[in-house]
Structures are given as C-alpha cells and as structure tokens.
Image (spheres, rainbow, N blue to C red):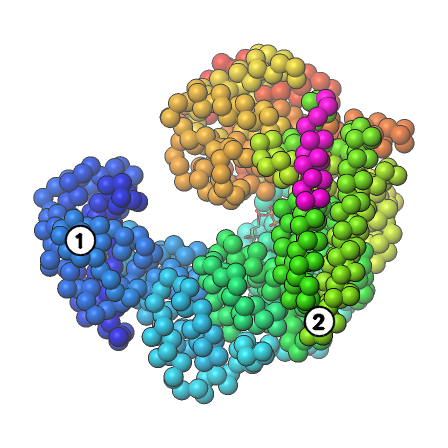
Amino acid sequence: MNQFVVVDLETTGNSPQKGDRIIEIGIVRYINGEVVDTYNQLLNPNMHISRFITHLTGISNELIFDQPTFSDIADDIYHFFQDAYFVAHNVPFDLGFLNVEFKNAGLPPINQPTIDTVELSRLLRPDAPSFKLSQLVTFLGIDHDNPHRASSDAYVTAQLLDELLHELRALPNATLNQLKTIEPYLKSDLHLILEQFSQKDQSKDLHYSYLHGLAYCPTDRTSVDVSDFDQSFGEWIESIFTNPSPLDSAFSPFEQRLGQRDISEYVFHSLSSHNQAIIEAGAGTGKTLSYLLASGYFAKQNKQKIIISTYLKRLQDQLLDEWNKIKGALEWPLQIANLKGKQNYISIPLFSDSLANDAQMNYDIALTKAILLVWLTQTKTGDIDDIQLPANGYRYFKTVSSLKESHHVEKSFYRDALMRVEEADVLIVNHALLVEFASSDAQVLEPFNYMIVDEAHHLERVIANQLGEQLHYKQLLTTFKQLYVDINSCTNDRKQLDQMFDSLKQELDLLFRYLNHLTKQGSFKKTQKNDLGRLQRSISEIDQTDFSVSVDMAERVTMLMGDLDRFIQSNQQKRASIEVVNQLRDQIQNIKSQFKSYFRLDDHNEEIKWIESETLGAENAVSLYKESLNVSTFFKDKINPLFDSIIYTGATLSVSNSFDYFKAQLGIDDSQGIERIIPSPYHHQDQMKLLIPNDFPIMDYKSMDPFLEATCEFIFSLADITKGRMLILFNSHDLLKKAYRYLNTLFADDYLIIAQGITSGSHERLKKNFQTFDQSILLGTNAFWEGLDIPGEDLQAVVIVRLPFDPPHQPHFHALAEKMKSEGKNPFTELALPRATIRFKQGFGRLIRTKHDRGLLFVCDERLITKQYGQTFLKSTPDVPTYYRRSTELLDLALEWFS
Ligand SMILES: Nc1ncnc2c1ncn2[C@@H]1O[C@H](COP(=O)(O)OP(=O)(O)OP(=O)(O)O)[C@@H](O)[C@H]1O
C-alpha cells in the first residue's frame, strides 16, 4: 500500500470531547511520491470562533458564516480515507477530531493504518531544533506558503512525508530490521513499509560500519595541518577589524564594536607573554569572538594547545557554532575539539544489550531506542546534545551512555572524542569537566599550556560543587532498583537478595524521613528556602545529638550495603563476567563511601553540608548536599600549575571597578598580568533610566506585608503603562510567593502572572510563555537574575524588589561568612556586599540586550541611595539617569518614557 491521505484540520480548540469543532479541512492524496488529489473546505462549526483562533488561523466567524457544516460534506470526503495510510502531523489530534465528526454524521470511524509525521520526524531527524510543522519544514528547506491554513499545512505535510520516507528507505538493512522489532510500540504503522524498504538493494549498507549488529556512521579521520604560518598578529587583527573585513560575509555585516579588538589584543599579548589576564566585557561586546580569534591565531602560530572552559554544555556548543561561523573566512584551518563528560556519549555495546531487553519498554523508551538506532547511522560524535529525545528518553540514555562502557570496546565515541582532543589546537570543555580532570585525570590536560576561562565568575561555585557530594533519596532508590535487577541476573539466591533489598529500602526510608524531620524542627529563622521553595538547613545548625541519630541510621544502611557486597562476591554465577561483578561492587562501594563521608560527626570547617526537603512533598523526598569551602586551595594546587597562562573573562567579574573579590575566591595571584574592564558598547545613558521610589514602607523581616503591598500596588499601576512586559526579580522565594498571590488578586484575570517555582515548566518554557502572551509579568528568583535573554519589546521594565543580599542562613553563604569571621575578615565587605553587587549587575543586565532596546529599571530598595554601600552597586553598573522620588512621580516619568 503506497497510498497516503494527508490531513490537516483547523479547529475551534483542542478537545472534540469538550465540544470543539472543525473549521477547515485540507486533504492531500498522495501515491508513489505524486500528489493525485487535493480537497479543501471551510466549515461552519455552529459555534463561536475565539479571537485567539482567528488570530492564529485567519478564520473568522464572518468567514465561515455561510459555509457547509461537517455533516454536509461527511459523505463526500469519507471515500478519501479508504485503502490508504492516514497521515497527519500529530495523528491523535486530527484523527480524534475526524472520528468524532464522522460519528456525529452517522458514519463509522476511520480505521486505517496511520503515519504520524511528528513521530517520524523525531525518529529520522532528531537533530531538528523543533518538531512544530512550520519550524521543521524551514529546517528541512521545504517551502511553506500559508502556515496554519489546512490546505497549505496538508500539502507541506505531504512533502515532509515524502522527504522522511526517502530518509527511511536510505537506512541500512541492519537498522531497518532493528526498527521492525520496536515498531509495534510506536504510534505509526510502519511495519509494511519497513518490510518493503529492508528488501531493497544492499549495496548502500557498505557505507556503514557495524558493531554488535548495529550499523553506525564511520568516523572521519581528521588530518593534522602542517602548513606554515607567517603573518604577524598585528597585521592580521588589523585586517579583521578594518572595513571591509574578511568576516563580513559570516556576519553580514561585521560590525565595528567598541572594545572587541582590544580584547583580542589583550588575550594574544597575555598568551604570548605567559601571563594571566582578567577581562570583564560588558554585554554586547562580542567577547567570545575576540578571544576565539586571538587564541586560534596564537595556537596555530606557536603550535600550542589551548583550552577554553565555559560554564555549561550549551555554551560549549555555542562556542563551537561561533567558531564554525568564522572558520571559512580564515586562511588557516584550526583543529577544534568539543569534549563533554562520558555520560554525554552513546555506547554501542551497552545500547545493543539494551535493545535485546524490552522488559521496561514503554512508548518513550521505544521511541528513544528507535531514534538512537537511526541517529547511530548519522552521528560522527555520538554526543547526545546534538539531538532531541522525548522527555523520558534522557533517563534511559543514561543507562546506555559511555559512563559504564568497558575500556576494551572496538568502537567508543568517548574514546574518539579523546583522540580528537589529542589532535586539537583548541579544546572546549565546561568548568565541571575541567575540575573533574584536574582532580582525577590531569593527563588529559597536560598537553594544554594555556587556558581561557569564560563565564569565570561561575568557576568558584562549580569547584565547590564538584568537590562535594549530593545524595538524593529518589535517585538512590532508582539506583538500588537497577542494582537489584543487575545483581539478580548474576546470582541464584533470589530469596536472600529480596530480603536484603527489603531491609535496605526500609532503612533508607527511615533515615530520609528522619532527615526531613530535622529540616523542619527548631528555629524557623534558621531554615532557608532555595530558588524553588525547597527548605534548606545546614547540618551545623542542627543539634548535634539529633544529627548523631542520623549518623547511626546511616551506619545501618552502609552495613547492609557491605552485606550486599559480600553477597555478590559469594553468590555470583559463573556466567556473570568478572567485569560486571566488579562494576556492581564498585557501585556499591561508591554509595557506601558517599554515605560515610556525609554522615560524620568529626567535621572540619573546610566543607559545608546541608539538607533540602520539600515543604509539602513526600516525607522522604530529601536531598543531601556537601560542598567544599576550600576552593582557592584546590584552584591554586590543582588547576593553576597546569597552565603557563590563564585568561579569565566574563560579563560580571568586577565590583566597584576592582577584581579583588574575584581573585580572592580563586586565590589568584595579585601581582601578574593585566586587568581590564571593557564597557558595554550600548548607550545605557539613552537606552534606560534607573528609578528608586523614596516613599515605600521600610522592609522589616518580621512583617514584610506593608512593604510587599506597596511594591505590588506599584507594579499594578506600572503594568498599565508597560502593558505587562515586566520582569520582577526577588531574592527570596517566600517574598516571590507572597507577591504572586497578592498580584493575582490585584490583577484578577487582566494579566498573566508567571512565577518561577510556582508556574509549572522549565525556565525556558516560562520565558517562552512570557514572550508569547501579550499581557504577562514574569516573577523570578536566583536563576532569573542571570542568563535570561529577552531582547526587544518583549521586556519593557525590570523591577528589582530588594538588593540581592544573600539571606543570612543560606547554607553556603552562612558557612563562608563564619569561616571569614574566624579568620578575622569582615564578611559584609568581603563577601555579602561583593556577592550582592555581582548579582545586582546581572539583574541590571537583563534590561538592555541589544543596541535598540529601551527600558526602565526600578529598584524598590532605597538602601541603594541612602546607605553608603549603595555606591558600590552604582559604581559597578553603567552610569544611567537615576531618579530617587515619590512613586507617583516615578509613574509619571514612566508614562512619559513610554509615550
Ligand atoms: N563584530 C561583530 N559583528 C557582528 N556580529 C558579531 C560581532 N561580534 C560578535 N558578533 C555576534 O554577536 C553575538 C555575540 O554578541 P553579544 O552581544 O551577545 O556579545 P557578548 O554579550 O559579549 O556575548 P558573547 O560572550 O557571546 O560574545 C554572537 O552571535 C556573535 O556571533
């Protein structure tokens, strides 16, 4: 059956069960790659079409007023669906609607095999940035004239199907045959098609490599460039930053940005003279490009290897994209490697084992397996960040990643990545991986004598974190479940194993319930809430006798793990390989030592431990954290000595034009190298104003209500002027929650209030919702002060509710402050104030994201003006027109600004 009927519907809403109806139908009949028939009809749903739907589709109540109803056309179109696959971009939606409408018209439901092009795209093009029809077809280069109209959508879906079937047909037989075994779990009925395609000519299969019966894309060997390099840096950088520039075609056009060339020169100079440099570059400078140019040139000219470390994996990929953008314009090729942790790379042997096992198969796992099978034939890196998996697929991926791969496999993507590192001039890593290598496997870093640390202000926390531990009840439970399955397959004595795991689970449950109780008892003032409203309590603030009870309980857990270890040793069956048994024992030992190092009474002051639990969640949903307080020693001993020169860069490194705080955190030597602050090229003076109300009630932690009410009422009045489009930044989750409730009562339904930790969804989703809905206001705490990028008119104003001082009992802050006190330092000037200033700079930076942005920044905390330390905040941010006035006057100013 090579006949397909591709359908697209426009409807009054999402649910036919709740009475939504079809308002337009588009059908394309398609046989052997040819469109043979099309049908399009507007329909009268006999109900009102909302403004939202009219806005989306262009179909108004007037337009369908004299059109037929579905029942009028039901008989005419029913024949379309005979003897053909039913195809749609999200079959359950279109088929669900059609069958309800056919039923209402007295006809039986369509019961043809289906193909869902969303599912098929996920499977065959997992590298697509989005699976929404319009974005997907743009990505694949298919023209789409009239999105959200049924005939155009159906036509384009037919073209998409054609493209996808070609891709499916081109897969090697080994992959097609594996897909056949997964197909019953998928939504689309692909069986006959897979059967047909797997009988094709097998000569294409020769293009692939094979391991454990799986086809994969062979690796290209990168050739090492040996060309001479004789242009001086001065001449070359001059040519780049002169009009016309060789980078014009890459950037169309390449702008002359203030400070960008300076950064390149500072970086090159510091690398050449084996010195360090600290360079802060304000938003919009384009610092990444600057240091890429300088470090690439330096590496190539001097045949030296450079590491670039950044904060997140996502930023690693952006760096690589930036390099790919410019590399065509440069005359010298550069080998650049992007390395992530083992857990990022797929392991072919582990994946092959897992394919043979469908014990835990569900739709998400089936789709993930199918995606990975196809992706293996496409990927050269094996890096999971290159594609999108279904939400639950990532958990499955962990089990087939290279993390637990044996060292002796014939093909390993992680090993390939390490080989690319050996050949690379420039290596991109993230801070966590850098710290991991520095603490355990410094060999990888040895050939690299130079390093650039971007987002350098994050390095301190990453080190603290990486040198610490985390134990989450839920994760432990999942690990134990997996251990049970694995041990069970190596031993004979199931009964004893069951008993051991029952006891282990029981003890673990008791321990975590008790810990939950500890976070909630005692002085409420000493309990802190994190970003997401979870309770935090430092172990040092828990009564030691109470904590010692948990130490005893933890000891029982570790004893049981010891029993388990001995059990595996003495009960293993012959068929379990030594390697597998050793892996299991290592895993148990690991958890055991984590418990032992956490539950100790003889604590020294070089680390901080705390407990987090849900305010309302399950009694045992508790997490334990430990972080190092001795970051600078680690940095000085383990990272700094590896490099001749380190360049630190970021947008928020300085406080009052000084890098002292940044240097103290990492123990960086004062004496050597250059320090520069490159101001942002934006004209903050013209693009924004800073407004501080002088008539708000004093904020008092015992009763914050008067202050909060004044702030919310101010936001309420301001929203009318800005039409929402406001980001409100809090430094306490409690305050955010209270403001959320109060604002909701004030606004009723006029505005959509989106709040971090309250509105469900990832940070990215909250941001998207804020941008999508017209009258919306976004409320955020910690994570939203930084990294939230909302350029253009979507953001008109930022309101900083309080100066972002850390709450005194935030565990990490509290421990650092205590340590400083014991060393005779002043925790306010040397810790609290610089930390708050850096955060303030980050919040300040949310408003102006491009040279065309305009906006207002409100700070509802008059300490910015009335306290002497307020100057530290003001001196650390761009100089802008500042008004300290009555709130009504500020509203007038706002009105003037926006009119
Ligand atoms: N001189 C230039 N002309 C045009 N585009 C540029 C130039 N330099 C950098 N870009 C592009 O601008 C973006 C980065 O500029 P942005 O305003 O975000 O700078 P930044 O805040 O210093 O951030 P980054 O650290 O990413 O460089 C990137 O997309 C980059 O490719």
Please give the label number shown on residue 102. 1
> Residue 518 magenta-drawn?
yes
Left or right of residue 561, residue 145 in this image: left
Residue at 38% over, 59% down: 118
Q: Is residue 689 visible?
A: no
Estimate the x, y position of residue 244 in percent, counting from the top left: 54, 59
Residue at 89% over, 30% down: 822
Label 2–label 1 contact, CB within 8 A: no
Task: Quarter of the image for the N terminus: give it.
Answer: bottom left
Residue at 72% over, 40% down: 511
Q: Using the rendered view, name the quadrant where residue 317 is placed.
A: bottom right
State which tag comes first along the sequence, 2 or 1. 1
Distance between the alpha carbons at the discs numbered 2 and 1 = 60 Å
Majority secondary structure of magenta residues? helix
Estimate the x, y position of residue 666 in percent, counting from the top left: 81, 44
Q: Compared with residue 805, is residue 226 higher up or lower down, i.e. above or below?
A: below
Left or right of residue 372, residue 834 in this image: right
Q: What is the residue that sits farthest to the front in this orientation?
A: 495
Residue extent of the magenta highlight: 506-523
Q: Compared with residue 471, is residue 124 higher up or lower down, i.e. above or below?
A: below
In the image, what residue type sits under mark 2?
A: Gln
Disc 2 is placed on an element classified as loop
Count neighbours of disc 1 (C-alpha within 10 A) and say few if under 14, some if 14 to 19, many if 20 or more.
Answer: some
Estimate the x, y position of residue 363 in percent, counting from the top left: 45, 59
In front here: 544 or 752?
544
Q: Using the rendered view, name the quadrant where residue 451 is placed.
A: bottom right
Left or right of residue 147, residue 136 in this image: right
Q: Is residue 304 visible?
A: yes
Residue at 63% over, 61% down: 485
Q: Which residue is mark 2?
A: 573
Task: Quarter of the image for the C terminus: give it.
Answer: top left
In front here: 649 or 742?
742
